[in-house]
């Protein structure tokens, strides 16, 4: 069932060292390194812990598809992104849920995705102009890494490593207040936080796999948000788009 190559790629894509992952999984670095070189088979408990750590489904981790780090555009920021709105969305999320024990980077990704798809459904446009890639653990915001790096360098945001149960999280906490949202934008953002903010990374990743934009996209390609209209109504309701069910 070797997971070595997938594990190496997921670790590097997350910016973690072997020591970081070993610590998060409560094992020694030599024991973890054996997994990366397929020197031993992981136990069921280890597979589940790795799946939870990186926000991927077990079948993706253990399957034949090689999980690769995302390839983004050259400058790391999508050309139509409203950087001010996007920074304030990140700050607002960080201020509201960043310190919650369940909220690491994967939860951040999914909350942004569900906020933007709800905005698209209501207004035929997203709040920030962000685009998303199809990745095994669900849609991933294309500009997030570059923008948060810029925010950290500008002392607008803190990135910290935390622990949730047995694994490590990358968490984001604000240094400045979020501003600049319209009342409707804030209502959209806060409704998703209220509905999905307390869910686990695994739940949100699996939920995003029910969305038609993710289902119809090619691996590592952009998802088409306009396809949310074709998502199963019950799944749409779970994603906060209740009014879809009534149409």
Image: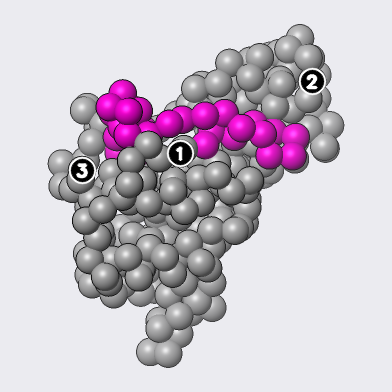
* Disc sitting over residue 74 in the figure: none
Tag 2, which secondary structure? loop
Where residue 174 appears, as percent x and y from the top left, is: 40, 40
Please state if 118 lies on the left or on the right of 106 as rendered: left
Instruction: Tell me the distance, in whole angstroms, between the alpha carbons under discs 3 and 2.
Output: 40 Å
Give the vertical position of 164 relative to 36 (above or below): below
CB-based contact (under 8 Å), mark 3 and mark 2: no
Give the vertical position of 212 relative to 34 (above or below): below
Image point 84% across, 31% down: which residue? 43
For disc 1, the marked residue is 173
Where residue 3 appears, as percent x and y from the top left, is: 68, 27
Of badges 1 and 2, nearer the viewer stands: 1
Please state if 132 lies on the left or on the right of 211 as rendered: left
Q: Can residue 174 be seen in this view?
A: yes
Give yes or no for residue 169 being in the magenta stretch.
Answer: yes
Image point 22% across, 27% down: which residue? 74
Q: Which of 233 and 83 is in front in this view?
A: 83
For disc 2, the marked residue is 27
Say few, some or many: other residues with alpha carbon within 10 Å of mark 1 (under 14 / 14 to 19 / 20 or more): many
Quadrant housing residue 247? bottom left
Q: Is residue 227 visible?
A: no
Instruction: Tell me the distance, in whole angstroms, between the alpha carbons under discs 1 and 2.
Output: 28 Å
Q: Which of 49 and 43 is in front in this view?
A: 49
Lower position in the chain sequence, tag 1 or tag 2: 2
* The N terminus - image quarter: top right
Please state if 39 lies on the left or on the right of 80 as rendered: right
For disc 3, the marked residue is 83
Where residue 148 appears, as percent x and y from the top left, is: 34, 34
Say few, some or many: other residues with alpha carbon within 10 Å of mark 3 (under 14 / 14 to 19 / 20 or more): some
Give the vertical position of 60 relative to 33 (above or below): below
Q: Specify the farthest residue to the bottom.
A: 246
């Amino acid at each position: 069932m070797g997971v070595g190559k997938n594990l190496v790629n997921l670790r590097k894509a997350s910016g973690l060292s072997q020591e970081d992952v070993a610590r998060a999984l409560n094992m020694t670095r030599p024991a973890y390194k054996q997994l990366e070189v397929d020197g031993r088979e992981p136990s069921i408990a280890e597979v589940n812990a790795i799946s939870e750590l990186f926000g991927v489904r077990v079948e993706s981790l253990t399957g034949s598809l090689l999980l690769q780090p995302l390839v983004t555009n050259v400058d790391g920021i999508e050309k139509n992104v409203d950087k001010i709105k996007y920074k304030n969305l990140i700050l607002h999320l960080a201020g509201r849920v960043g310190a919650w024990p369940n909220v690491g980077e994967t939860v951040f990704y999914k909350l942004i995705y569900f906020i933007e798809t709800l905005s698209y459904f209501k207004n035929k446009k997203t709040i920030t102009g962000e685009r998303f890639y199809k990745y095994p653990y669900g849609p991933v915001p294309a500009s997030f890494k570059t923008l948060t790096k810029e925010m950290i360098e500008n002392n607008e945001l803190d990135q910290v490593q935390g622990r949730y149960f047995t694994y490590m999280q990358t968490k984001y906490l604000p240094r400045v207040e979020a501003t600049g949202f319209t009342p409707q934008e804030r209502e959209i953002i806060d409704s998703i936080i209220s509905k999905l903010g307390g869910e686990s990374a695994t739940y949100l990743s699996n939920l995003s796999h029910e969305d038609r934009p993710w289902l119809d996209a090619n691996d590592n390609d952009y998802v088409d948000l306009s396809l949310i209209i074709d998502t199963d109504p019950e799944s749409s309701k779970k994603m906060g788009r209740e009014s879809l069910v009534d149409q």
